[in-house]
Amino acid sequence: MLPPGSTIGILGGGQLGRMLALAAAPLGYRVHIYAPEVHSVAFDVAARHSQAAWDDESRLAAFAADCDAVTLEFENVPVDTLRFLSGHVAVRPGARALEIAQDRRAEKAFVRSLGGQTAPFAPVADRAALDTAMTAIGTPAILKTARMGYDGKGQARIMAAVDAAGAWDSIDGHVAVLEGLVNFAAEFSVMLVRGIDGEIRYWDSPHNVHRDGILASASLPPPAIVLDQQDTARAMAAQLADALDYVGVLTCEFFAAPGGPLFNEMAPRVHNSGHWTIEGAVTSQFANHIRAVAGLPLGDTATRALPVTMRNLIGDDIAQLPMLLADPAAQVHHYGKAEVRDGRKLGHVSWVGCRPA
């Protein structure tokens, strides 16, 4: 267990790192953020920060020397960075979870090896392989880059074979997977926290709604089909966490399909669909992630009151801030980002125990 006054390093300087730092302070911990970007919003609330490249070993070694444990807020940190740091300081979660989460091919194969269900998929290494995959999977389907895709980026829909060439060009010929479109009633996430001792706790699964490939809202209670499938999905997520000897918050996204939950993807970190837990749960995902990384007892994950709604403030949505602040029930979070642009998450707002006005 890390004593108060210890320093927790966080790889990545975005809003998730910012909220992790804010959650660490009441537990008595200092935070050191490491990120390559000059303007990282997590820098504003951290005791220390290092602005340096992911492969700068001298800066990484100095960062490790200043930290008592290291975690991450961003799954696209190079795996070699985690491996290097692991030789100097405890890194939680470990490199194996990151390695799997970074490659959709490895991720889906890993889930299937544990008995989980996914949408039908086939790897696509080149243009000819896309034609082969379409023969196997059929259309309509979605072509997704195997790496670096998030918030709808690196994806193209193929409704018929004639769309294949345009879809391939739109992802710049990157190695990919072709996923068959599935019939589902709702999207939801399983958020769990696993301690160093293997204890697992779950938050209630929210109903997630996406707009243009980006999460727009997460709400509780979810539709009945999600409640019916929640335990099965939790068991699958726990298998993943145990197999990886995972420490911290792990989020798995699922489709609520007629035949049961279909695994979509995992995030080895705190997650946008769990932002409601800041006000809506006894212990937030951010506080419990810090607890797990520090070796503290895990906090209660119970929902404080229903209903719960979390809405992202994306792009021009941030202009709603004065109106939202005038709502006494709205819990507003501004991430401190200066530039407003389409598709950029600039904040979120939550309502707990009531519906949005």
Image: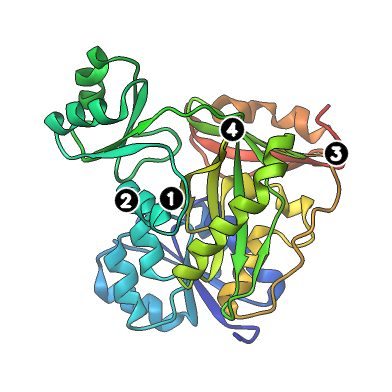
Q: Nearer the viewer, mark 4 or mark 1?
A: 4
**Residue annotated with mark 1:** 39
Q: Is residue 77 visible?
A: no
Q: Amino acid at mark 3?
A: Ala
Gap between marks 4 and 1 measured at Cα: 45 Å
Ranked by sequence position, the earlier of labels 3 and 4 is: 4
Task: Locate residue 217, reporting x and y percent.
Answer: 64, 34
Q: Nearer the viewer, residue 126 or 239?
A: 239
Mark 3: which secondary structure? loop
3D distance between C-alphas at marks 2 and 4: 27 Å
The label shown at residue 103 is: 2
- Identify the residue at image location x=68%, y=40%: 226
Distance Cα–Cα, label 2 vs label 3: 40 Å
Q: Disc 3 versus disc 4: distance between alpha carbons?
A: 36 Å
For the N terminus, the quadrant is bottom right
Identify residue type, mark 1: His
Q: Secondary structure at mark 2?
A: loop
Q: Give above or below for 46 relative to 130.
A: below
| Label located before the other in sequence (1 or 3) | 1
| Three-letter code, disc 2 | Asp
Dot 4 corresponds to which residue?
A: 258
